Image (spheres, rainbow, N blue to C red):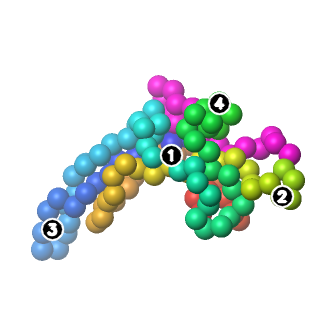
Amino acid sequence: MLRILLVLSLAIRASSYTVYSVKDSYLRNDFLDWDWYSSSDPTHGRVNYVTKSTAIAENLTDATDTTFRMRADTKKMLSPSDPGRDSIRISSPTAYSESVFILDLWHMPTGCATWPA
């Protein structure tokens, strides 16, 4: 569950250290306003990225006062010809450079071929 993402952008570069300040902060349902990718996987993986409305309808995402959740489908039976499991791919509406990202996560999947790739 992604609770917070702070983006600290380069503010001042001093002689021996760098000072950062908070540029953007995303909490809980703010992630519902991010860009939802729903085209075929550009890395040619076996996944079916879905729209925000489909993700909500299929219980692949939700946001509350305290959390934002992203899930992959684990219930549908797939045939070899299916494009892959329904999943979510979002990206921030802003591009960043020279930044530090701070994430507060409750759970991060681990293992081969799991998010984040």
State the residue position of label 4.
57
- Residue at position x 12%, y 74% from top? 15
Position of 5 compared to 105: left or right? left
Q: CA distance from mark 2 to mark 3?
A: 53 Å
The residue closer to the viewer here, 97 or 47, is 47
- Residue at position x 19%, y 69% from top? 17
For the N terminus, which image quadrant?
A: top right
Q: CA distance from mark 1 to mark 3?
A: 34 Å
State the residue position of label 2.
81
Q: Position of residue 87 (x, y in %)?
A: 65, 48
Task: Please report whichever mark, 4 or 3, sits nearer to the chain's N-terminal start.
Answer: 3
Q: Are marks 4 and 3 in contact (CB under 8 Å)?
A: no
Range of residues picked out in magenta: 61-77
Counting other residues with Cα less than 10 Å from the Cα at mark 4, is it few (<14), some (14-19), or many (20 or more)? Answer: few
Kindly report which numbered mark, 2 or 3, lies closer to the viewer in this rendering.
2
- Residue at position x 62%, y 50% from top? 49
Local SS, label 2:
loop
What secondary structure is the magenta-colored segment mainly? loop
Q: Which mark is residue 36?
A: 1
Q: Are marks 4 and 1 in contact (CB under 8 Å)?
A: no
Among the 4 quarters of the image, the one containing residue 45: bottom right
Local SS, label 4:
helix
Position of 32 compared to 115: left or right? left
- Residue 57, compared with residue 4, is above or below; it is above
- Residue 32, compared with residue 86, is above or below; it is above
Q: CA distance from mark 4 to mark 3?
A: 46 Å
